[in-house]
Image: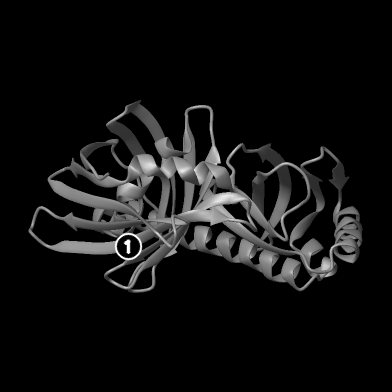
Amino acid sequence: MRLTSILALVLFTCYSVICSAQDSTPAPQPSQAGTQSDAVSLEIVAVRAESQAFVDAFNRHDAKAVAALWTEDAEYVDDSGAVYVGRASIEEMYTAFFAENADVKIQLAIDSLRMLSSGVAIEDGRALVEPAPAGAPGISKYTAVHINVDGKWKMASVRDMWIETTVTRENMADLDWLIGKWAAEEQGNRSESEFSWVANNSFVQRNYTTTRVDGSTTSGVQLIGWNPIMQSVQSWNFSSDGGHATGLWSITQAGWAAAMTGVTGDGLVTTATNQLTRLDENAYVWQSIGRTVDGMELPDSDEVVIKRVSKTK
């Protein structure tokens, strides 16, 4: 699938759907089930805090602090297949890594985080390292198993996988296919978008408006361009309520996936993974999965069909 197949779909409603996700959050029920749900949400927040502690320690190049976030008998498999067993071995590996990479920084884009039991959680996401590693462009995906040890969350198992991508800066020329107007409807909500080239054809700008069933509207601007540091196409969204989000794109067997992270206008952190499938030259299917708002998991969105209204020459 061409680059245009991803962006035509996701650019249309990705951020407006994520930002309005809290509207679809089921209201808490005054029952034991509600109490259990609150407890799960608190555990999810605690695991996210542990993941952020890893990022902070990594960016300080503090190998001892990084290793302290793992269990004593933890196992780490890096993207080359090397295996490190035990906290001491992991600390030694990070010490050597920081010595060889004096400027390295990391960000985690968490695609999904769910509880397997009261004391076990599994996290899937992408590790974004700057400066980007040498070699073919790609993205580092990981799966981490967290367990609760004496009231503190620790990493028990982490596996990294490097996935090469074929997206290049030259693919930006394909975005010309998007230029024009698009529209879609979902459960009575109508979204309209218009795409145009800006900055000497270096970026595509999308202006969008979403009209809800009750007549209220939201609007925003999205820019799509090449991120030379990440060696990937990236999107930046800015909503009329003050919210904003970024998206990083990767190739999947079914087409494309976009990992979105952002914040609503009232300060709630949002995450989602948007999946895209092409129907034909004038229509696409979009779905958002792994959605969270303020650490609370939301159900997957319905599939949305996006159709071309007109093409601007």
Residue visible at 58% across and 41% down in the picture: 167
One can see residue 186 in this view: yes
Give the x, y percent position of residue 135: 77, 44
Q: Residue flagged by tag 1: what amino acid is it?
A: Val
Q: Is residue 39 left or right of residue 152?
A: left
Q: Is residue 180 left or right of residue 65?
A: left
Frontmost residue, 15 versus 111 = 15
- Where 189 sits versus 275, above or below? below
Residue visible at 82% across and 37% down in the picture: 81
Residue found farthest to the left: 215
Frontmost residue, 159 versus 10 = 10
Secondary structure beneath disc 1?
Answer: strand
Q: Is residue 83 left or right of residue 4?
A: right
Please rate how many residues cluster around mark 1, counting C-alpha atoms within 10 Å: few if below 14, some from 14 to 19, many from 20. some
Residue visible at 81% across and 62% down in the picture: 67
- Where 93 sits versus 135, above or below? below
Give the x, y percent position of residue 15: 35, 55
Which of the 4 image quadrants contains residue 82? Answer: top right
Give the x, y percent position of residue 30: 26, 59
Disc 1 target residue: 221
Give the x, y percent position of residue 31: 29, 55
Which quadrant is home to the C terminus?
A: top left
One can see residue 269 in this view: no
Frontmost residue, 166 versus 174 = 174
Residue visible at 16% across and 48% down in the picture: 190
